[in-house]
Each structure stands twice: as C-alpha cells, then as structure tokens.
Image (cartoon, rainbow, N blue to C red):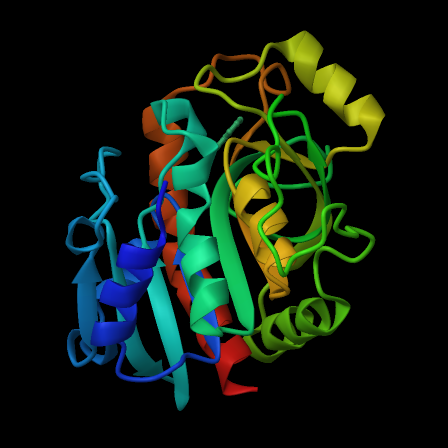
Amino acid sequence: MELRPALEALKARAPFIPEIVVVLGSGLGLLADRPEAQRGVSIAFTELPGFPPQTVEGHAGRMVFCELEGRRVLLQAGRFHYYEGHPMELVTAPMRLFGRLGIPAVLHTNAAGAIHPGFRVGELMVLRDHINLMGVHPLRGPNTPPGPRFPDMTEAYDPGLRAQLHEAALATGQRLQEGIYLAVSGPSYETPAEIRAFRSLGADAVGMSTVPEVLVARHEGMKVAAISCLCNMAAGMLPRPLAHQEVLQAGQAAAAGFESLVRAFLRQ
Ligand code: HPA
C-alpha cells in the first residue's frame, strides 16, 4: 500500500500537529460526536487515497482534529480490523500516517474479554504489556526506515502515560485495572480451553485488535498507551455462551466512564 498520497491528503487538511491520537474502539466512539469534535476538522477514511470504506457496524470511519480539554488531539473513530480480512498494512496504515505526521503519542482503546478472575464486566484496564497470538506480524517484510529492523518492545506501553492514566482514574474516582492483553485474530470468540491456556500464559484480557497498531506505532517511535473496556468475562468463565449483543451493550454502559477518564487524562 502506497502511503504517500494518503499522507499528502492528511497533511493538506490537518489544521495542526496533534499532541496525541486517541483511537476510539468498538462502542467507544462517542467522543467523536461531541461539540468539541464538531467544531474540529473531520476527515473520512474514504477521503484518504488507498483507504476502503469502513465496514464494521456502528463505526463512522474518520479522523477528527479537534481541541479537547485544552489539548490539540486527533480522534480516530473506527479502525480496520484484521478479522474483516484487511491486510495488516491497512490495519496499521493510520499509525504509519500518524508517525509520519509527527504525532508523538497514541492512546488506543478497545473492547476485550476479561480473563483475570478478579476483573468485572464494565471495568477498564490499562495495558501493561501484550502477548501477540494473532499469528501475523505487521512489520514482516522489508523494513520501513527510519524504524529499526528489530524494534525493542521492552516498554511498548509507556510507563509515564500509564501512570497518568492511573492518576486520571483517581481524579475521577474510577476503578482502573492494569494487565496483559492477549491478541487473537478472531472473528470467533475463544473456546474455554483457549481461555484457560491464555490465563496460564499470563493474559488478563483477550481481544482482536490493537496489538498490530501498537507494534507499528512503536516502530514509528511514538509513545503508546492503551485501555481495554472489559465488555464480557471470557469464554467459559461464566456458565453461559458469549453474545455479541451483550458485549456491545457492556461497551455502551462503560462509554461514559471511558470518556471521563480520557478527558481527565488529557487535562493533566
Ligand atoms: N474475546 C475476544 N475479543 C473480544 C472479547 C472476547 O471475549 N470481548 C470483546 N472483544
């Protein structure tokens, strides 16, 4: 995928270089509809050469440059998932663009299933680290300089940003968990045996996104933070099957807390 035309299109429309990108995951897109966002500059993915129309339900695929809590931010509403059949290059293309635009940091959000038995549905979890079991790697292939061929992932999730998220949670009186996110390709939910295996591997939550974007954002030299909304207990942890509808509802129920956390984080 040739990124230069999309980068030129984005540069032509960008009113400023944001301090941070907030990637709004499934069910967490409300921020992009707020008055601050409506006063901003909105760019549909379809306006960027090489980007296909967004397919996941409930997502308007766009990027919004706006001021939020006194900060210049870029909101990415909607993302391309690997399970939709998109190539990794497209899944991670926004991160390449953000890196090339000179944006120094990114906050990812996603929906995830809780594996840690102490977690509750509706809670938020800061990612401390991840385990990539998607079976693919977005950096496979010729290296894209100036990023290194073998990028270090020792502190993929920036300790300073993580501490700021915990301070924001204290300020808003929210419970904020921290843990390890394990990424699978989906689109099926996991089997109970897989969840037991993931737990023994050290995973606290499981999901189908974010890790490819984090790997590319780190390759681009950006600081990364990520939050999971724990939308369900993972397969086999409760005596009933998973229903996508319930996962979506839990996401919606957690959206307000998520928004206040992000706002408090930006105010710091
Ligand atoms: N598994 C994988 N992805 C998810 C889940 C889950 O249980 N919940 C939300 N996204």
- Determine the image quadrant of residue 113: top right
The residue at 31%/48% (across/down) is 78
Q: Is residue 244 above or below residue 3?
A: above
Residue at left 21%, top 50%? Answer: 49
Which quadrant of the figure contains the N terminus? top left
Q: Is residue 258 left or right of residue 29?
A: right
Q: Is residue 31 above or below residue 135?
A: below
Residue 21 in percent (x, y) is at: 44, 67
Residue 123 in view here: no
In percent of the image, x 19 and y 77: which residue is there? 35
Q: Seen in the image, is 34 located left or right of residue 86?
A: left
Residue drawn at 59 percent across, 19 percent down: 238
* Relative depth, front residue between 99 and 187: 99
Q: Is there any visible trace of residue 39 in the rendered image?
A: yes
Left or right relative to 51: residue 261: right
Residue 165, position in %: x, y? 63, 70
